[in-house]
Image (spheres, helix red, strand yellow):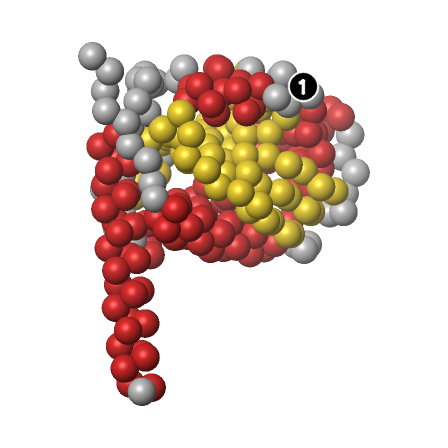
Amino acid sequence: MDAPSIGLTELELDALTELVNLGVSNAAFSLREMVKEEVILSVPKVSLVSCDEAISILGEQATRRLVAVQQNFDGAINGRALLIFPEVNSLELVRAVVGGAPSLEDIAELEQEALAETGNVLLNGCLGTIANILNRTLKISLPEVIYGESGDFFKEPPPRSASDRVLFVYINFALRGGDLKGYIAMLLDIPSLRTLQQLLKELIENIAGQTSISKTHVD
């Protein structure tokens, strides 16, 4: 018997999208501090998809080889977060983070460290902001850099089930004059997704209540 599935309402997804945008904005500020140059990050789309749909989206890349920085998180919500982009863009990202014009040999030595640091800043910015606004705490693991094809990133432990959902965030980078497109994927099991949905409902109700009080005072 299949495990039950769950989705977010349009209002809940809008609220979550706003949280993700705030998290990415915080991450952009941290990246600016790190690279000492203007960094622009935008989130054109956030969606909730199945693991198979996420694999299909990633598989549409012109190049099948991808690189990801992954971090596990646990607390009120448990899951795994990944920053994913085509492997061919990894050198461009490393050059942007390291600065100057490093040789290919230098880039090879610095690649793992630069990718891990970038992923750590972005993923912590998103997860930390979401947790803070929802008044919850998350414990986030150290970053790990992995390479592979689209399906490989969802085979990592803990094992996924057919009912797991992926919060899929499309993200655009603009740093040091270069443009990169990537993704943030947050893999959630059903219990964690239900918890997230309840927290979003509470957030929406609180905002609605504050708006109602504000209107009452104005009237």
- Residue at 34 percent of width and 44 percent of height: 9
Element at label 1: loop
Quadrant containing the N terminus is: top left
User: In this orientation, does residue 18 appear?
Assistant: yes
Label 1 sits on what residue type?
Answer: Thr
User: In this orientation, does residue 143 appear?
Assistant: no
153 vs 141, nearest the viewer: 153
81 vs 171, nearest the viewer: 171
**Residue 178 location, x and y as percent?**
74, 42
Count how many numbered circles sit on residues in the image: 1
Left or right, 111 with respect to 197, comes to: right
Local crowd size for mark 1, using a 10 Å CA cut-off: few (<14), some (14–19), many (≥20): few
**Residue 31 location, x and y as percent?**
58, 50
Left or right, 151 with respect to 138, comes to: right
213 vs 64, nearest the viewer: 213
- Residue at 50 percent of width and 20 percent of height: 55
**Residue 18 location, x and y as percent?**
44, 53
**Residue 138 location, x and y as percent?**
29, 43
Residue 143 picture quarter? top left
Quadrant containing the C terminus is: bottom left
Give the farthest residue toward the top: 1
- Residue at 64 percent of width and 44 percent of height: 173
In the picture shown, does residue 193 fall above or below 52? below
193 vs 31, nearest the viewer: 193
In the picture shown, does residue 136 fall above or below 178? below
In the picture shown, does residue 203 fall above or below 107? below
For disc 1, the marked residue is 63
- Residue at 56 percent of width and 52 percent of height: 28
